[in-house]
Each structure stands twice: as C-alpha cells, then as structure tokens.
Image (spheres, rainbow, N blue to C red):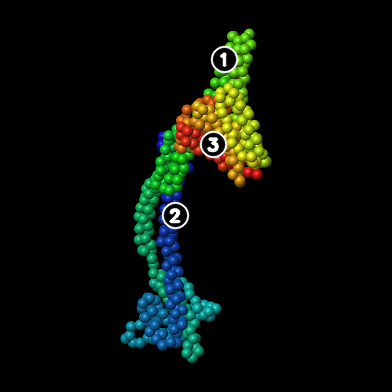
Amino acid sequence: MNDLRKSFDTNSLKFKLWTYFIFFAAIIMIILWLLQIVFLNTYYKSMKTNEIKKIGNALVEEYNKDGFEDLIYSTSFIKGIIIQVFNEYGDSIFPINTFGEIRPPKREAPINGSFIRKLEDSPDGKIIYAIEDFRMRTHSVVYGAILEGKNGEKHYLYINGLLEPIDSTTSVLKNQLIIVTVISLLLAIGLSFLIATKLSKPITNVTNSAALLAKGNYDVIFQRGDYTEINQLADTLNFTTAELSKTEELRRELIANVSHDLRTPLTLIKSYAEMIRDISGNNPDKRISHLKVIIDESDRLNALVNDMLDLSKIQSGINEVAYKEFDIGRTTKNILKRFSVLSDIYGYRFILNSDDDDIAIGDEQKIEQVIYNLISNAVNHTGEDKLITIDLRNLGEYIEFKVTDTGKGISEEEIPHIWDRYYSSGKTYKRGIIGSGLGLSIVKSILIAHDARFGVESILDKRSTFWFQLKAK
C-alpha cells in the first residue's frame, strides 16, 4: 500500500515528469489536429487566393506586351484556371475564338454590373473575392483588374480559379491522425514513465541515504548516478558525511575527556574530604596536606571551566581584540614566574632566550593566554630532562615566539589535528601536570583572531617547537 501511494504521489518528481511529458505530447497532437483538420480548409483557401492574386498581378504587368495571349494560354492550361480579358461592352478580347484551335477554358460573359462596380470602386483597380459556383457545386476565387488598352480604352481582366473540395483529403488525414495520436500517446506514456523513473531514482537513493545519515549512520555512502548534478550532490554529501563523522568522533572524545577531567578532581576532593573527616581532622600536618590537595584540585576544576568559557567566547567572537603595543619579553618573564613552583617541586627547567627589543602589537591579555598555554603544553609533553626552552626574536616586521620541549614529538599525520580540543598524540588522552586539555584550541582561536602566523615543527623522539609571529612595533 505504501509503495502504491509513493508511485502515485502527485507531488513527486517522478509523477511530475510523467505528467509534463504526457501533457507535452497531448499539446503536440492538438496542434496537429488543428492544423491538419480544423484549419486545413482555411489554409488551402488562403494559399489558392494568394496564388491567383499573384498570377493576376503578373498578367497586369505583361498586358500590351508581345506574347501576352500566349502567356494567358500557358498559364490557364498549367494552373487549370479561367483567364479572360473583356472590353467595356462585355466582348471577349483574349482568348480569341479561332475555329479548329484548342483554346484555354473560358466562361460566357462573366462581366456584369456588380463585377464592374467592384472594380471601379476599388482604389487600385483590382479586386479578389470568393464566390459559390452553383454549376460546379463548389467555390471559386475571382480576380479582377482594370486594364488600359493601347488606344486608351478600358479592358477588364477576369480570372476564376476553382477551390477543389478537400473533404476526402481531410477524411484520410483524420484517420491517419487518429492512428498517430493513439501511438504517440502510448509512446509518451511509456517513455515518460521510463525517463521519469530514471531521473528520479538517483534522487530517491540520495534521499534514502540522507534519512540513514539523519539517524546517525555515518557509514552511509551516497551513490553517484548518470548525471553531473547528481554526482556533484553525492560527492558533496559524502564529504559532509565524512566531516560529520569526524565531528562526532571529536564530540565523543571531548565528552570522555571532559568527564575524565571532571571526575578525577571530584573524586580526589571527595576522598580527601572524607579522610579529613575520618582520619586527619585532629592532625594539623595531615589536615593541611589533605586540604592542599582539595584546593589544588578545586583550582584545576576552576581552570577547566574558565578555559571552556574562554574558548566558547573566543570562537563565538564575543571577545574582541584590543590592539596595543606591549613588551612581549616582559610578559613572558611574568608568566614564567607562575611556573616557578614546578621548578621547585618537580625539577622543571625553563630557559628564556630573548632580544632586548621585543615590542609587539596585539591584545596583551589574550597573548598572555597564548604564551601560558604553549608553555603549559610543553610542560605536559617534555622529556625526562624536564627542559623547556623559550626563544623570542625580533625579525624586523614581526616578533617571533617559540617554545620547545624535549618530548617524543609529533608525526606529520597528526600535526594538522593537534589544535583540536583534547587531541592527544596517539589518540591516548593523558591528564596533564597543569592545564585543562583545551590550551592549544584556545591558542589557535586567539592567534586566528590576531591574523597571526603560527605553527609547529617536530622531530619524532627528539623535540617539538610551537611558534607564532606578531607584528612588531
């Protein structure tokens, strides 16, 4: 039942094409019927009238010239029409009655008062009209013209051409048109159905595949067809499907990693709070140590929430860039002071190499986020020597910032993805020493807002260097 309804869906492309094709064939048949049956008599009469008028005008031009009589004879025989020239008394001048000679057909004294009056009243001395010939039981076309004789006398040209009945011809054409119409309509129905099916099938396949995609099936493949437009649509949708699949994978990773980052500090906070309640509540040293863990994990949670808010604001364009000149070297030194606790507790080493003139143009507060997140990323990925090197160089037009770690490096295939949220080399997420896992994504968004150049250079098992360039003063 559903398939039957789909087949006769009046709004479907298949039904529309089928209907338009049959309608077009019907219009062609109607035009043929009108031309061949309805308008045939009118068309024939018009053509015959124009032919006789043309002959009459030609004879008027040739009157009084040599060979005029022969021209009347030949034209009358060839065209099968009556041609006569009379004087004002109604006597026949041409053709001349000669005993024993074959002459063209003529009629007895066609000149009458009505014919003469029509000619005299005509502005150009010429008339043409149709009359009913009762003797021949048919209609004929009459042409008349006033001729001037050699001596100035008036003569009258009379031409009569029969309009032969075409009823038998019309009957034959009608029978043939009935057969042609039936065959044409049957062919139109069949061909239109095949063409409509062939045109609508690839679109139907794309629609069915799109329905699967809407249900979350990212393995669906949109089939190409026989038409360029369908192929372009299928290629676009296949590309869209691949991008949606990547987005879905990143979404799942983001949820998993954020859940991990939230669960770990929450678990620690709860555990240490219970320890304070049950064990170390009366022991000042243990209580202070446990409270420090709770504070640190609370700070980590706060940093995660702040980073997520910052990233959302930056990517949605809420935060505008406030350009101004600032000393990027001094900013970097201030940021390194915040990492001194890692040097004291975990043995991290930070080396800063900078020029004296490091004045850049940008939003200092946002660039501070960039530098902090790049150094934080280096801390989380540096090697066992725990060495992080920062280089600041004045290139004239630009100030270049570089931070290098001594970690395992990044493969060329993974470099384009490292700016994604929570992306980790090897797809194995690792909770960092500091930071929220959103640092590089924030860095990318801020630097794009500054129209800054940035990138990463890496050698596997040796080092990775992240860099960016800001316009110099």
At 44% across and 43% down in the image, what residue appears? 235
Q: With 330 as the anchor, is 458 left or right in this view?
A: left
Q: Is residue 398 above or below residue 170?
A: above
Secondary structure found at label 1: helix
Which sits earlier in the primary sequence, circle 2 or circle 3? 2
Cα distance between the residues tagged 1 and 3: 38 Å
**Image quadrant in which you'd find residue 318:** top right
Q: With 189 as the anchor, is 323 left or right in this view?
A: right
Q: Residue 358 location in percent, x, y?
A: 63, 40
Circle 3 sits on which residue?
A: 466
Q: Are marks 1 and 3 in contact (CB under 8 Å)?
A: no
Residue 305 in view here: no
Q: Residue 210 location in percent, x, y?
A: 46, 37
Badge 3: residue crowd in 10 Å (few <14, some 14–19, many ≥20): many
Report the amino acid beneath label 1. Answer: Ser
Q: Is residue 459 above or below residue 384?
A: below
Q: Quadrant of the N terminus?
A: top left
Q: Nearer the viewer, residue 66 or 290?
A: 290
Q: Which mark is residue 27?
A: 2
